[in-house]
Amino acid sequence: MAIPLLLLLSVLLCLPHESTSFAVPNIRLPLPRSETTGEAQTVVSVTDYGASGDGINYDTEPIQAAIDDCSSSGGGRVRFPEGSYLTGTIFLKSGVVLDVEEGATILGAAEEDRYPSDRLRWYAVVAENATDVGITGRGQINGQSSAFVEEFDPRKNIMRSWNQTGKCLGDECRPWLVGFIDSKNIRIWDISLRDCAYWCLHLVRSEKTVIHDVWIKGDFDTPNNDGIDIEDSNNTYITRCHIDTGDDGICPKSASGPVVNLTATNSIIRSKSSAIKFGSGTVYNFENFRFDNITIFDSHRGIGFQLRDGGNISNVVFSNIKISTRYYHPSWWGRAEPIYMTSCRREENSGAGSISDVQFINITSSSENGLFLSGTEDGLLQNIKLTNANFTFKRWTNFQDGWVDYRPGCRGLVRHRTAGMILEHISGMEMENVRMRWSPLDLKGWNNPIDFTPSTVNKITFKNFQSDIY
Ligand SMILES: *[C@@H]1O[C@H](CO)[C@@H](O)[C@H](O)[C@H]1NC(C)=O
Ligand SMILES: *[C@@H]1O[C@H](CO)[C@@H](O)[C@H](O)[C@H]1NC(C)=O
Ligand SMILES: *[C@@H]1O[C@H](CO)[C@@H](O)[C@H](O)[C@H]1NC(C)=O
Ligand SMILES: *[C@@H]1O[C@H](CO)[C@@H](O)[C@H](O)[C@H]1NC(C)=O
Ligand SMILES: *[C@@H]1O[C@H](CO)[C@@H](O)[C@H](O)[C@H]1NC(C)=O
Ligand SMILES: *[C@@H]1O[C@H](CO)[C@@H](O)[C@H](O)[C@H]1NC(C)=O
Ligand SMILES: *[C@@H]1O[C@H](CO)[C@@H](O)[C@H](O)[C@H]1NC(C)=O
Ligand SMILES: *[C@@H]1O[C@H](CO)[C@@H](O)[C@H](O)[C@H]1NC(C)=O
């Protein structure tokens, strides 16, 4: 056990940094005595505190007592040996790493009275105002999403919502799985997060987070089970993750502050919505994002931007991205676009923001729809650069095409002929070595490479642009 962990740590600290413009946050978390030459750290097991691990009786209190003791004695590890630990919300405290061992599951409650009265703390596991915290151990944290399904439907499940509490409205009144709020120095690794009733992993106003070798698996028919949501948080590094969820895979949002420095590499994402999505909560700015070596498949959208609330997005690089997108039932969010960038006011009185300095390098895609790049008069897309890209277009599902989607808000869903690339309200677009290939068999009359909305597109450069029927 000691050697693999140390190896992992050194691998992490030696990851190549060339393609990232900020270093991997150097996070050192408490390690048990056997793994360090330094000071001894506390290692406790939840079973020593009376946790049953039978998956039937609630273990909330013993788990919390183990965490509290471990934290107050200077931090260390809290072990979950093989077993199933049913629990209401547990609060992770400073200095503590949860070690959910292979064969162990933390099972989040499906009953509302097991969660705190404050809706913002509805998580199975949450750290708040904590530093040097982590979750690892090769086991899993499970949100029992099927217990939240009112009616299974392969098109889209109808979910049970705790909206009768009055604490939230609509059908999104469900608990998150794991959260870090106002926390710092966070590491989540070698763990699987499964069957989230709502978002799986949520960072809120947090700083310095490394997420690696995490396997996130939601129910593909369950709405709103996002993979990783990075909200108002800085310096986040995601690598070697596998995310498979009904809703957005990696999703930065801003509500009470900016999102700065996010890097995601070497990961695989499948989503019935957007694999990568900015927004739609976009009140503050987003700066300095890198995505490299990401494979997106079976998704409803590949890379998505939904700027709606007056924040600006700038300095984003996507490199070495493979994308496959298709249509799903129209009740889901997406129109099979490999790349979709929209900036518009959510409502008339919302702010307007712009998206600038975004580069796409080495992109290949196979998709049922083209790219949709759409700014507005007061929310331009500026300096967008596409270098070395191969887009293949064909149809393989029978869902209807011929719509452009400005939702949420804005102009809604609008009938529009499909094209390889729809461009509106753009200032500065450079394309170099861009190739579109069309399948002659399943195009159904769709082979218009570029659709410009006249007089809204300015400063366009093409170098080696090609479009062929193959
Ligand atoms: C973002 O990363 C850059 C480069 O490493 C660093 O100089 C800057 O301080 C970081 N920003 C924040 C808000 O931490
Ligand atoms: C957050 O933690 C710091 C340091 O542990 C403490 O001083 C502060 O009171 C805490 N704030 C809240 C809101 O809990
Ligand atoms: C509560 O949630 C149910 C199930 O998702 C939904 O049908 C209903 O419209 C919601 N009611 C309110 C008041 O939000
Ligand atoms: C992120 O960095 C910005 C400065 O760029 C700062 O205003 C904000 O408070 C930082 N957020 C956190 C959670 O540290
Ligand atoms: C790209 O990511 C995949 C995992 O998705 C990994 O197997 C592969 O080694 C990575 N390639 C490079 C060049 O790092
Ligand atoms: C976005 O940019 C515009 C134009 O520069 C600016 O007026 C606005 O304040 C910016 N928004 C934020 C949240 O900083
Ligand atoms: C793009 O791909 C080429 C050929 O594989 C490679 O040499 C180059 O480094 C890649 N560019 C980036 C920014 O990764
Ligand atoms: C695009 O296709 C061309 C021709 O097959 C190939 O040489 C090039 O490497 C491809 N580029 C990418 C980024 O896949």
Image (cartoon, rainbow, N blue to C red):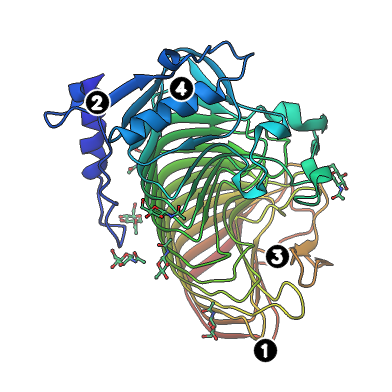
Q: Could you tell me if the residues under marks 3 and 1 are in contact, i.e. CB atoms within 8 Å?
A: no
Q: CA distance from mark 4 to mark 1?
A: 56 Å
Question: Label 1: which residue?
Answer: 455
Does dot 1 land on a helix, a strand or a loop? loop
Q: Which residue shows up at 41% across the image and 30% down it? A: 67
The x, y position of residue 13, in whole percent, is 23, 44
Question: Label 3: which residue?
Answer: 419
Instruction: Tell which residue pokes out farthest to the bottom in this image.
Output: 455
The first of marks 4 and 1 along the sequence is 4
Which kind of residue does numbered mark 4 sit on? Gly
Q: Which residue shows up at 59% across the image and 71% down it? A: 283
Which kind of residue does numbered mark 3 sit on? Ala
The first of marks 3 and 1 along the sequence is 3
Q: Is mark 1 within 8 Å of ligand 6?
A: no
Tell me if residue 390 can be seen.
yes
The first of marks 3 and 2 along the sequence is 2
